[in-house]
Image: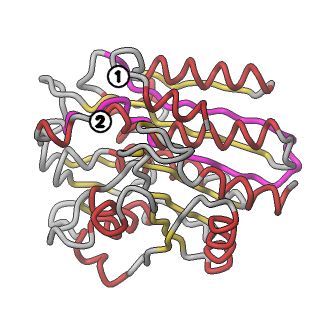
Amino acid sequence: MTLARDLINTPANDLGPAQLEEAARALAARHGADIRAIVGDDLLTENFPLIHAVGRAAEREPRLIDLQWGEAAHPRVTLIGKGVCFDSGGLDIKPDSSMLNMKKDMGGAATALALAHMVMQRHLKVRLRVLIPAVENSISAAAFRPRDVYTSRKGITVEIGNTDAEGRLILADALALADEEQPALIADFATLTGAARVALGPDVPPFFTDDDELAAELMRHAAAENDPLWRLPLWRGYDAMLESKVADINNVGSSGQAGAITAALFMRRFVTAKSWVHFDLFAWTPTAKPGRPEGGECQAARACYALLAERYG
């Protein structure tokens, strides 16, 4: 929990993509895990075009961090964390009130690392993989633009409806990579939408999955661990909101409604595994409470750890 909070609370001038990679490497060294990073234009060479597009405007190079641990014979579990180290909104720039806390937009990455720490520390019998697309969403002549069209790693073409919906873009390439191995479980963590906060507030992250058994397990462990979660639907009727006239899909919904659901539906296009779960986190405690100091917060990791420990402990 401390690892996640410390990373989230660190100012963005001290925690860019390279520093997030350093934190992942320190964790890997502690547990004897393997780790590599694909940096800058190498993302294009190795077919991660959406991660590159989002991060290319920043002086600090984008990267995909890939940590692997455990015996190859054990069930594969892949964790993915959104690592936007600061989000200006890009050319669709955020207002100052929305930009103020965007140092926490790598809260999903911090959560994934915290959960990985729990799994490795307790030697769960899994083949663990952690994927962190780490970028800064900045503004420069190189910034990606509204109405640009990119071909993702999976081959799905994406029209950019809004550059401030960048998290789902970088996660899409990471999800496609994770899905290529068909692991037993894929879990992604992301500070993704304001719509989730409107629906459930800062304390209760929604999660999305097509796996009813997994959802029931998560709700049970969330209650037992006092790590609140609430399931929202992957309502296929809203897929039409993501239609594009020039690409396979738009990165934002057309109506302005159901924003958390349409974001989850967007990412659903990039993964075929049934046991996939997406957590839309706030990763922040706005007002101090007992055991919950104001600032960065590690949400969903304890419930997920309890589930993994029960399955693979």
Label 1: how many Cα within 10 Å (few below 14, some 14–19, many 20+): many
Mark on residue 33? none
* Residue 87 horizontal side relative to residue 73, left or right: left
- Image spot of residue 173 (x, y percent): 45, 46
Res 295 quadrant in image = top left
Judging from the image, what secondary structure is the residue with disc 2 in?
A: helix
- Image spot of residue 114 (x, y percent): 63, 38
> What amino acid is found at the position of numbered circle 2 in the picture?
Met
Residue 306 is at least partly visible in this image: yes
* Above-or-below relation of 215 to 144: below
On whether residue 151 falls in the magenta region, the answer is no
Taking the spot 50% from the left edge, 31% from the top edge, the residue there is 64
Q: Nearer the viewer, residue 305 or 204?
A: 204
Give the CA separation, mark 1 to mark 2.
Answer: 8 Å
Q: Are marks 1 and 2 in contact (CB under 8 Å)?
A: yes
Q: Nearer the viewer, residue 99 or 274?
A: 99
> What amino acid is found at the position of numbered circle 1 in the picture?
Ala
| Residue denoted by label 1 | 12
Mark on residue 102? 2
Taking the spot 44% from the left edge, 49% from the top edge, the residue there is 190
Locate the C terminus by quadrant: bottom right
Q: Nearer the viewer, residue 55 or 100?
A: 100
* Above-or-below relation of 297 to 11: below
* Residue 79 horizontal side relative to residue 252, left or right: right
Res 161 quadrant in image = bottom left
Taking the spot 68% from the left edge, 78% from the top edge, the residue there is 213
Q: The magenta stretch spans which residues?
A: 60-89
Q: Residue furthest front?
A: 290
Residue 248 is at least partly visible in this image: no
Judging from the image, what secondary structure is the residue with disc 1 in?
A: loop
